[in-house]
Amino acid sequence: MPFDRPRDTLEGVSVDDLVIVANRLPVEAVENSHGVVSWRRSPGGLVSALEPALTGKNATWIGWTGHYPKAGELPLPPIPERDDDRDYRIFEVPLERDDVEQFYDGFSNSALWPLYHDAIVTPQYHRHQFDAYRRVNMIFAQAAARAAAPGSTVWVQDYQLQLVPAMLRSLRPDVRIGFFLHIPFPAPDLFLQLPWRRPVVLGLLGADLIGFHTPGGAANFQAVTERLLGWPSHDNVVEVPAAHGGRRAARIGAFPISVDVGEIDRLARDESVIKRSIELRGELGNPKTMLLGVDRLDYTKGIDVRLRAYTELLHERRLDPGDTVLVQVATPSRENVDEYQRIRDDVELIVGRANGDLGSLGAPAIHYLRQPLPISELVSLYLAADIMLVTPLRDGMNLVCKEYVAARVDGGGALVLSEFAGAARELPQAWLVNPYDADGVKEAVVAAATAPVDEKQRRMRAMRAHVADHDVQRWAREFLDTLAEGSNNSVVRSETSSS
Ligand code: ADQ
């Protein structure tokens, strides 16, 4: 019977070997006060999620440093292949300025990102940018093909690398390939706008397992494959014609990502973090109610939505300007893309107007920081905030709301959460809002601010129980276990297929 996978080549070979392929590496360059650049572990969920899976294995992480050579700048020092905190290898994919402009700022962040987020801003489709996307995806696929041991597992991450699974399969049919999409997969009618929809879907179907945050994303993808390719699919499996005849199974599943609950819990109980949270409230003038937003400065996050709602509530005196503060921390992001400059301007206009109209000397209505903060400072802010505002117009999951819940070891706090964040399915006890309904957002903020303490605690208890049981390490384990399980039955015999 024709099988696509030459299984005999796997015999006697360790299948534990794991290669992660992600746009970014798990290390970042930092410069000390003497101008000396070194590498340190990147903060962020993906690194904590995947490190337990990588540790103790013969493992490699392939990605880009986030820098490209600029005229007159000294080159960055080489990344140590291994160091004390890390027992897996790093394999750098160098990107040139043109790649960054066309593949990253261009096709990834000006076409795919807006399209996959419900076309909140108009996606820009340019042939030369897709050509760069294809070229850079091939560079990543070739790097993975070189780094993967025979029969090993390769796990490709996110929308920047959707062509890698099929490219890698053609280079290395012996490896097991997983793909996870960290952003939403849109409704079929939207996705089908994409001029290069077919290569993107075929690229993804090169994987043995394609993971999404929600069942809705998985269902959208399955509907697209049916409409576009007409290949049989059932029970979350698409039957893909295989290179050597017959069919192979590409499985589709929902794996909601989460946060490093253990680490956030540890920080939230740390004395210096607790002390800092008390200090922060003091610095804000010990208001009766403190509201908080923490986001990348991205137009999908609905930062403007919440700031407008809050400002109107102050104007209407439904919140007391003398006794309420809002802190918005927004980390700069993708600043070369026009739409990101526009959202920055919009947000800063709202903040400026609110403070001009409603603030007083030394007591602005909105405290706005456009900077990244260390996670310990974020946890202090989470502990200090009475109400967390998470109002994206669309979000694959949203980790900030789960970080807030994980940090509230005191059982306090209240979460206002957009229905259009993937996390809303798991946290129905939040005050859920439609971010397009300005009055609804205002109602929810007032309801969260005025709810009885026992109601807030009841809601928070339920959310904490869910998050405690579904941490990011569980997410990685479940994806990799599902990928491994499929290796024995991922071959569909041609005569049993239902085409
Ligand atoms: P993002 O769009 O980046 O992630 P999110 O899930 O909220 O969005 O994660 C942001 C992370 O950045 C959080 O861990 C947060 O703490 C951190 N962060 C935000 N502002 C910060 C600041 N000022 N300083 C320091 N850290 C800050 C994409 C998808 C999401 C999906 C994740 C993971 O868009 O939907 O949840 O990937 O799959």
Image: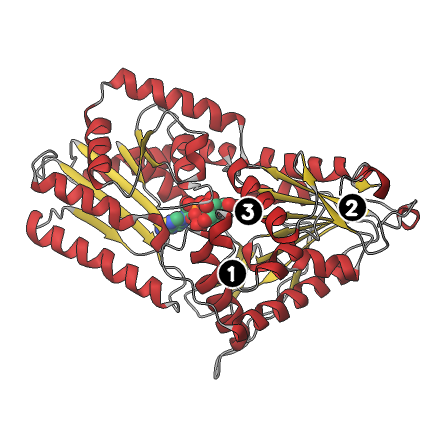
Disc 2 or 3, which lies upstream in sequence? Answer: 3
Foreground of the two, 238 or 136: 238
Residue 452: image x %, image y %?
Answer: 22, 18
Foreground of the two, 184 or 50: 184
Quadrant (top left, top right, bottom left, bottom right) of the C terminus? top right
410 lies above or below 441: above
> How many angstroms separate mark 1 from mark 2 (CA)?
26 Å
**Quick check: 163 left or right of 76?**
right
Residue 440: image x %, image y %?
Answer: 23, 35
Q: Is mark 3 within 8 Å of ligand 1?
A: yes
Name the residue beneath numbered marker 2: 248
Q: Residue furthest bottom?
A: 72
> How many angstroms separate mark 2 from mark 3 (CA)?
29 Å
| Point 30% across, 28% down: residue | 413
Q: Residues within 10 Å of mark 1 (few under 14, many from 20)?
A: some
Q: Residues within 10 Å of mark 2 (few under 14, many from 20)?
A: many
Q: Is mark 1 within 8 Å of ligand 1?
A: no
Name the residue beneath numbered marker 3: 46
| Point 21% across, 27% down: residue | 447
Q: Is mark 2 within 8 Å of ligand 1?
A: no
Q: Name the element at disc 2.
A: strand
Foreground mark, 1 or 3, reads 1
- Please identify the quarter of the rendering in which residue 137 is found: bottom right
| Point 78% across, 46% down: residue | 248
Name the residue beneath numbered marker 1: 194
Q: Name the element at disc 3.
A: helix
Q: Across the whole image, how many numbered discs are drawn on residues?
A: 3
